Amino acid sequence: MQNARHVNTHSKKGRIAYARQVDEMQSKYDFLIVGAGLFGAVAAHELAERGKRVLVVDKRGHTGGNLYCRHAEGIPVHAYGAHIFHTDKPEIWDYACKLGKMNHFINSPLARFGDRLYNLPFNMNTFHSLFGVITPEEARERIKAEIAADILKNSSGNAPRNLEEQALRLCGRTIYETLIKGYTEKQWGKPATELPAFIIRRVPMRFTYNNNYFDDPFQGIPEGGYNGWFDRLLEKVDVRLGTDFQKERGALEPLAAHVVFTGCIDEYFDFRLGRLDYRSLRCEEKMLPVGVFQGNAVGIYTEAAVPYTRVIEHKHFECGRLAELPVTAVTYEFPDTYAPGKTPYYPINDARNTALYNEYKALAARCPGVTFGGRLGQYAYYDMDDTIAAALAATAELAAL
């Protein structure tokens, strides 16, 4: 994912070359984009297409952000956890298809609890496995009866005080204890009784035998992984890898008239108002000497006693293209507490963090030369299609500067 214009400044030789290039620059860039992930790369591409001079910097040694794929014995491995593109917006699907050939992978994960497997999302296959029901009416009545029984037994008539009480009112005890409780507690690192109720506002249930996880009409993965997207998005801009903006901002900021920052917004302001909280993820990859390991791309482990939440078998993302390979690559995903030095994955949008982000947002509004974007820059959980749409909208405004 590097071309002749990319310089990796992790090495001493690279830093010298980078310094020489900076000295030789005869004019400023129009835009400095911090972060070569999806928001930053789309913004860079669109600005370059409009004739703007763009420099992208990233402290990692590769472009692509968390979409980066590492190739292992011919298998594209999603290095930062599985990413499946899906959208209900035809124009965003068309945009993705222009970046590379999309396959039509359909996400149909299997959840494991004990020695039983359950289809996700919750649908008639799930309800049949849990309750032995066959018709949608039987499933609705069983779930409704469980909810009513729990309300009668435990409810004081007040609003749910925590996630557990909320979930029991939405789906009943069997679904909650089998498929939600353990997974959620691992994901957030806290008992469900200590998590706020708003985390689980609804429990999507389908009363059809449809295992397609997403409702969106367009979904798939670029053939060979996401790296090709970023090669195309960044082919007309200068890229500096291994470059930590926070450490080198004194030299970098004067190079451009405007900064697009896609890192953590609290870090940009040197945490002057306090640190925002995140959840992280630890991925353990294994190459196994078998053609198939679990027979499905995504396995979800809902028991609290199993430390990982998902097992990803990457070759299945290629829709049979790699079926004949005698090996397979799997990744075990372990939810992790975020700390400096780890990768921030998920914002924790509780009352404290929402209030703190709003303070940082007000601070950012007083910085007319900086645009904040992406999950970390806007402290929001964006799907990929939302990220592309947000970057396109921001670019339309930035191009007029």
Image: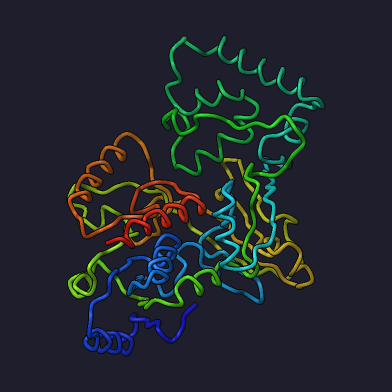
**Image quadrant assignment for residue 357:** top left
| Viewer can see residue 2 | yes
Left or right position of 212 against 94: right
Percent position of residue 393, x then y: 40, 53
Q: Is residue 354 above or below residue 89?
A: above
Residue 7 position (above or below residue 374): below
Q: Give the image location of residue 307, x and y in percent.
A: 55, 49
Identify which residue, 372 or 298, lies in the foreground: 372
User: In the figure, 62 relative to 145: above or below?
Assistant: below
Q: On the picture, is 238 further left or further right than 175?
A: left
Visual colour scheme? rainbow
Image location (x, y in percent) of residue 398: 32, 60
Q: Of 213 and 229, which appears nearest the observer?
A: 229
Figure quadrant of the C terminus: bottom left
Residue sitting at x 42%, y 52%: 390
Residue at left 72%, top 71%? 327
Quadrant of residue 18 within the rendered picture: bottom left
Residue at screen point 70% across, 67% down: 328
> How far across and how far down the image is residue 244, in percent?
29, 71
Point 61% across, 17% down: residue = 147
* Above or below, comparing residue 61 to residue 130 in the picture: below
Residue 254 appears in which quarter of the rendering?
Answer: bottom left
Q: Can residue 339 be seen in the rendering of this structure?
A: no
